[in-house]
Image: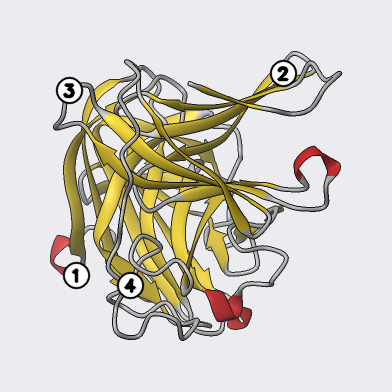
Amino acid sequence: VVLLDVGEGSNDKYFVGFNERQVTVASLVDGAYSLHGALVAGESTTLTNWRDSGLDLMVMVHELNTDESPSYADVEITFGSQPESSIVASPTGAPTKATTTKPTAKCGNSICDADETPGTCKSDCIAKKFYTRPKPDAKADGQMFTIDATASSGNGIRISSFDAVSQRGGKNECRVYTRPGDYAGYEEDADAWELLLDTKVELEKMYPTSLGLLDPAVSIPAGAKQSFYVWCKEGIMYTQGEKGAEGVSYGSDDSLVIHQGVVTKQLFEKVTGTGKFCAGISYYASASDVPKEDKASRKSKHA
């Protein structure tokens, strides 16, 4: 665990930790605990106006390596526009290991091309994370919902991963599917969906846990709609939707809008009602589409 310096005279604490599945960024402010990010490789989170400086502090995860003993995470912390430090957070204090990435031929054009990620070309691809934040109050095996890329997203966005919240925690078999446009009429048609992720993951109890990177990341052009289906065998938490509000938006930022969807009791079977996906969504945006004062993630707006 790394403790971030918040300045003299403050009792607030900010932590960057590594639990072998993800890097967590959390704070303890006025006795209240808050989670700011649960990140896997290629993801980042931003603490805005760090220490009232007018500048942001970004935590970027370049690599998670559990094949070596002890395991480690390669994390870059950037204050303002320059790297503050490059660290490795490990439960057992592994030595620092530098990460180098080979830029693509198009790297430097401020557009996050299909073969680029923040790890291969951070000047073009900005890693952002959006938390939907409604409080989970129900459980289902699967959740279907749509995400729009806003017209202001310019070159569009690429969805790279989802978090999920488990009621009991423990090992879970999870899958993520997608299809272009709306899901209506395809709720029980598995052939109409593309499987992006099929994994077994250790989910923490009532805590957002990354399901892992999607392969491939899903491109959504500006102004377009994409459907997603997140399913876990042992179930995941969601927020019950309002009656008659399927398709109504309930969260957004500068680049995306998420809409209320439906929940299923089994894989592609038995739609039981409407619901709000209530965890994190990680995506890449082109540097040319991100305001200069925000090169990672701006404060989200929620309805």
Q: Residue visible at 43% across and 51% down?
A: 43
Q: Hey, what amino acid is under mark 1?
A: Ala
Which circle marks residue 192 in the picture?
A: 1
Mark 4 sits on what residue? 116
Q: CA distance from mark 4 to mark 1?
A: 28 Å
Label 4 crowd (10 A; few <14 / some 14-19 / many >=20): some
Q: State the SS at label 1.
A: helix
**Quadrant in the rendering for residue 90:** top left
Q: Residue visible at 29% across and 52% down?
A: 213
Label 3 crowd (10 A; few <14 / some 14-19 / many >=20): few
**Quadrant in the rendering for residue 195:** bottom left
Q: State the SS at label 2.
A: strand
Q: CA distance from mark 3 to mark 1?
A: 42 Å
Mark 3 sits on what residue? 69
Q: CA distance from mark 2 to mark 4?
A: 38 Å
Q: Hey, what amino acid is under mark 2?
A: Ala
Q: Hey, what amino acid is under mark 4?
A: Glu
